[in-house]
Image: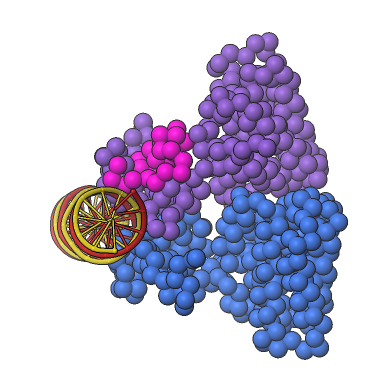
Chain colours: A purple, B blue, C yellow, D red
Amino acid sequence: MSAGSATSDDKPRNAQTVKALLKLREMVLNGELPPGERVAELNIVERLGVSRTPIRMALVRLEEEGLVDCLATGGFVVREFSDQDIADSIELRGTMEGMAARRAAERRPDRTELAEIRDCVGSLDTLIRRRELSMDDFSDYIRLNDRFHGLLVDLAASAVLKRSIERILHLPFASPNAFVFVQSELPESREILSIAQEHHRSILEAIEHGEGGRAEALAREHSRIAQRNLQIALSNQQQLDRIPGGSLIRQRERA
Amino acid sequence: MSAGSATSDDKPRNAQTVKALLKLREMVLNGELPPGERVAELNIVERLGVSRTPIRMALVRLEEEGLVDCLATGGFVVREFSDQDIADSIELRGTMEGMAARRAAERRPDRTELAEIRDCVGSLDTLIRRRELSMDDFSDYIRLNDRFHGLLVDLAASAVLKRSIERILHLPFASPNAFVFVQSELPESREILSIAQEHHRSILEAIEHGEGGRAEALAREHSRIAQRNLQIALSNQQQLDRIPGGSLIRQRERA
DNA sequence: TAATAATCCGTTGTATACAACAATCAGTGA
DNA sequence: TCACTGATTGTTGTATACAACGGATTATTA
């Protein structure tokens, strides 16, 4: 059996590195470590109570994830992202999810393989149909939405693709759920949710029918919802703070 | 000016880590470190004359690149790749290069921006037209081919996309040039080169005309040449040793 | 003989010591 | 007053010391 599943208070061999990685990522996304600023390692040592070795390990990982940059003079800097970077990340995710959807369709998975995602789409359906969406409903939506996207990638049955998608998701504003809270305050919020859910249903249908091209096109179009929300969020600094990693976004000066 | 461009014998701050990274990557691709086997750090210390700290840094980077895996019990293992993994990597590269080609076309770059890639395609044209291809010609081809793919990605003007493509290229058999040597010994070698070059020309043309869909489709189809070569290489163990990282490939048992 | 318990060795993850370099600041000279 | 030089401090990259854990080997018992 898997070791220590009790309360998941496993003590893995590399607990310090994991702790440093999680904490540092959190600090970067919080804006606690301001973008463009050097990460002072000794400062982190003091704050986390972990020695420099695991901290530097974590920084290397964060650099590979793209959240920090490696300075030529030594040390690391928190990266900042332009609106173009974010749009590109979303487009890239859309492209890769499109590939996943097409492959899933072309594989012709049998009913049992599709059971989970059908269930997921079903749950989303009943959720969306509610008159009012409470805060809990929204967090349910986020969980189900994440699950849908995860299952979609799994259906492609490609470890390489999965890894690549997970990689881009490390940029928090590239996530399918990044703009849900921004969206939830728009007057057309419900309509957008309906459209997104229509996409989910249609993608599933395309996969069931083996329609690879349709599945791919739909998944791409689906990601454009995030693009639209991004444009809205960019128009209002206050909303930027509501999306994960919003403090890392440095808007280009508008002409 | 850039520092120390004289003979590039720069001594960067992190020379040991860089050395360890390059050497380790080489050892993995050589098969010097057999796939599936634990990387004994002390062993590497002895072989490279570098202490464990930079070696572990390099191992973390290699793990992010996908060449080694992080063992739950501690330490790292050299990964092995199935033929499916390789096919998936090539397909993913094709998909991302397709996105790059489409974006390049949709951007409508002006003549000066296109000068370099036109020159590159021109050089390839004259190279291909030769009656016989010497060994030097082949290494020229590899260089020009790499340049074409690099310029294509640059034309997309997306740092995010570029980073993601460079990432997948760290898997050596995903590179556009991975199978050139295998290909060169086939009877139909010249014909394949002609087809590939026709693709290059057409992709450039599509970009010049702003034909995004066409550019994307062509770039994807272009990557299928690598798929075909892969199938050929897999049919013959001897040829596997001629492609970079061939020792990491573990063929699935054939039914 | 086979299975289990105990011990030893090797290896990893972490902390720390140290040396080289960069940046900052004070001081001197014109 | 300003420019330039020298020293000083802080920070990084590297090496190493150490402790905990895993795996293997041996010993013991049913």
Q: Give percent across and percent down for residue B144.
A: 69, 74
Q: Give percent across and percent down for residue A16.
A: 31, 44
Q: Give percent across and percent down for residue A237.
A: 57, 27
Which residue is at a point 57% across and 63% down the rendered structure image?
B171
- B54 displayed left or right of A144: left
The quadrant of the image that shows the C terminus of chain A is top right
- Evaluate whether residue A86 shows in this view: no
Is the residue A55 above or below the residue A31 in the image? below
Q: How many marks?
A: 0
Is the residue B209 above or below the residue B120 in the image? above
Which residue is at a point 69% across and 63% down the rendered structure image?
B151
Pick whichever, B84 or C30, lies toward us. C30
Which residue is at a point 47% across and 78% down the rendered structure image?
B7
Is the residue B32 above or below the residue A109 in the image? below
Residue B253 occupies which quadrant of the picture? bottom right
- Residue B243 sits inside the magenta stretch: no
Q: Give percent across and percent down for residue B79.
A: 49, 61
- Evaluate whether residue B172 shows in this view: yes
Pick whichever, A119 or A183, lies toward us. A183
Residue B111 occupies which quadrant of the picture? bottom right
Q: What stretch is highlighted in magenta?
A: A19-43
Main SS class of the magenta portion in the image: helix
- A2 displayed left or right of A247: left
The quadrant of the image that shows the N terminus of chain A is top left
- Residue A34 sits inside the magenta stretch: yes
Which residue is at a point 80% across and 80% down the rendered structure image?
B126
Is the residue B92 above or below the residue B136 in the image? above
